[in-house]
Amino acid sequence: MATALVLPAGRSFAQNIDPYTGMPVYGSAGGAAPDLGVFQVDPDADQRRNQSSFRAWHWSDFYPSLGKGVILADVTSRALHYWSADESVYLLFPTAVPVSEDLTRRGKTEIVRKAENPPWTPTPSMRERDPSLPQRVEGGVPENPLGVRGLYLSWPAYLIHGTHDTRKIGRKSSNGCYGLYNEHVLKLYEVAEIGTQVAVF
């Protein structure tokens, strides 16, 4: 199992995660954030894979209200933050991010659709860059780069999804989407509603 941080409602959190141990960093090394109850899910089974340090963010830095919930995709830290509508759930996941700035769309969007075992159809620009790509890959097979769940954004062809290729997590490795470990996207899929606000920065 990979690293996921869960924070009890109404609590602050460490500003950084040590990239070698996966544990929260506090005090001067972590930006002087106090130890207020961050814990790691299944640390004994943790396998770190190219994760960078996570920066501390709060949904109110981007939105005036939670609405149906907020997701922040931090391209620089390669991290995805989630807050539920009532702020009772906060999740922090390492993520794959776009390989280049020209493939990175920044701004505000929202989740407009959710899919289990989504099929993958390469975009025309992907096929132009790599003509060997298939026309379509059905969902639920290891060759499908979208993994076990997809959360589609209002921007066409952009989504948050799982991946079977765990080497991509924590790296610049996508064509514009944000990839999570399959076990993490299952958790996010369960709690994130259609209409959840998403800020990519």
Image (cartoon, helix red, strand yellow):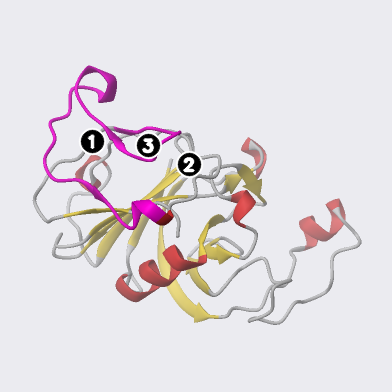
* Circle 1 or circle 2, nearest the eye: 1
Q: Quadrant of the N terminus?
A: bottom left
Disc 3 marks which residue? Answer: 54
> Quadrant of residue 54 in the image?
top left
Q: Earlier in the sequence, mark 3 or mark 2?
A: 3
- Examine the rendered structure and indicate whether residue 94 appears above or below residue 61: below
The image position of residue 86, as x and y in percent, is 13, 64
From mark 1 to mark 3, how far is it between C-alphas? 9 Å
What range is drawn magenta here? 16-44
From mark 3 to mark 2, how far is it between C-alphas? 7 Å
Q: Amino acid at mark 2?
A: Arg
Q: Is residue 92 left or right of residue 105?
A: left
Disc 1 marks which residue? Answer: 14
The image position of residue 145, as x and y in percent, is 67, 65
The residue positioned 50% from the left and 69% from the top of the image is 152
| Kind of element beneath mark 1 | loop
The residue positioned 17% from the left and 29% from the top of the image is 33
Q: Earlier in the sequence, mark 1 or mark 2?
A: 1
Q: Which mark is residue 78?
A: 2
